[in-house]
Image (tube, rainbow, N blue to C red):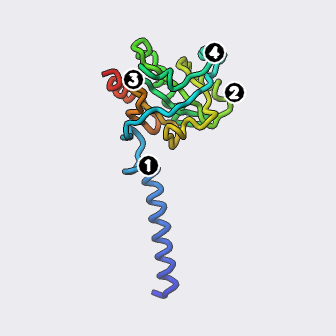
Amino acid sequence: MTKRNISFVVVLAAVAALIALLVYGLKGGSGGSLGAISVPKRAVPDFSLTLFDGSGAQTAGGTFSKADLLGHPAVVNFWASWCPPCKEEAPHLERVWQEYKDRGVIFLGIDVDDNEGDARAFIKKYGITYRNGPDESDIGLDFGRLGLPETFFIDREGQIVGKFAGAINSEQLRTFIEELLQ
């Protein structure tokens, strides 16, 4: 084998290895998997969110802040109307919100990198009735959001105690919420 052929084989092997790592990561390989993620317990960052109003199911309006979470278990979901997994999880979030809202659990949706018309259409299409607003001041970065969708679970003391990356389903939501209610 010539020196040129050896170099070609080495480069080809390196490219193949990089492609394999990329595919492994995208499929949820170890360390990059989607789902429940262990996070160190920490305080929710200070934030103020202007809520959507007048879009069918969303009529609350006003603002929502960290102070509104205190004393309640909470689910904070970061989403966007253009995000396919967000569309997949939207009915689950609304369903579980309906099940737990009378038990003092707060749900808050924070729309990321979207335009208002598309966000309002998403809320209407999926019949979302819990509070939602646009992330106009990088609230997601302060929470530690890395992608979409991501859901954070907050205890009554205002501490982030759990995180789920990717589309969450009803069973997974119930499991996290039941832990928050204990």
Q: Quadrant of residue 154?
A: top left
Q: Which residue appears at 52% of the width and 31% of the height?
A: 46
Q: Quadrant of residue 24?
A: bottom left
Q: Position of residue 81 (x, y in %)?
A: 60, 32
In three-dimensional space, the C-alpha distance between marks 1 and 3, rounded to whole angstroms, equals: 35 Å
Q: Which residue is mark 1?
A: 27
In three-dimensional space, the C-alpha distance between marks 2 and 3, rounded to whole angstroms, equals: 33 Å
Q: Which residue appears at 37% of the width and 51% of the height?
A: 30
Q: Which residue is mark 3?
A: 156
Q: Earlier in the sequence, mark 2 or mark 1?
A: 1
Tag 3: amino acid: Arg
Tag 4: amino acid: Gly
**Is 138 positioned to the left or the right of 100 in the image?**
right
Q: Which residue appears at 60% of the width and 33% of the height?
A: 135
Q: Secondary structure at mark 2?
A: helix
- 167 and 31: which one is in front? 31
Residue at the top extreme, as displayed: 102
Q: Which residue is mark 4?
A: 56
Please report contact status of discs 1 and 4: CB closer than 8 Å, yes or no. Answer: no
Q: Secondary structure at mark 3?
A: loop
